[in-house]
Image (cartoon, rainbow, N blue to C red):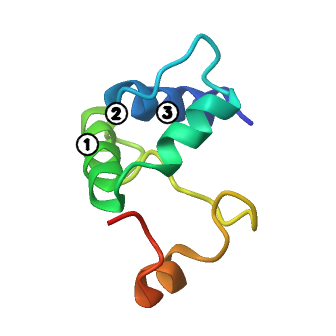
Amino acid sequence: MSDLVANNTAAVARSLNCTQDDPDSEAVVECLSTIPFESLMNVSVSLARQMRPPFGELAFYPSFDGDYIPDRPSVLLRNGNFVK
């Protein structure tokens, strides 16, 4: 993971009180996975706007990995498969 992605992810985690000593830890990922989608996106957009340019509207993009994020976010939203 690049430093830029790691730093942006750590900033999102800190903003959502998902902090640990190691921002790459499983505990941080597990905490972020419990955050409602709307909260995660609100923090992400807010942080991205503070850093703009060059990020546009989002500095943190959840990636489909088949493990923590089991499908494309658009599919998960359409099917209602997110923390409510």
Residue found farthest to the bottom:
79
Q: Is residue 73 visible from the viewing direction of this image?
A: yes
SS type, badge 3: helix
- Image coords of residue 78 (percent x, y): 42, 89
Give the mark nearer the N terminus: 2 vs 3: 3
Q: Which mark is residue 8?
A: 3
The image quadrant where one finds the N terminus is top right
Q: Is residue 53 above or below residue 83?
A: above
| Residue receiving disc 1 | 49
Q: Quadrant of residue 18?
A: top left
Which residue is drawn at the image coordinates 67% and 57% (left, top)? 68
Q: Is residue 57 visible from the viewing direction of this image?
A: no
- Image coords of residue 14 (percent x, y): 40, 24
- Image coords of residue 26 (percent x, y): 69, 33
Give the mark nearer the N terminus: 3 vs 1: 3
Which residue is drawn at the image coordinates 52% and 50% (left, top)? 33
Q: Residues within 10 Å of mark 2 (few under 14, many from 20)?
A: some
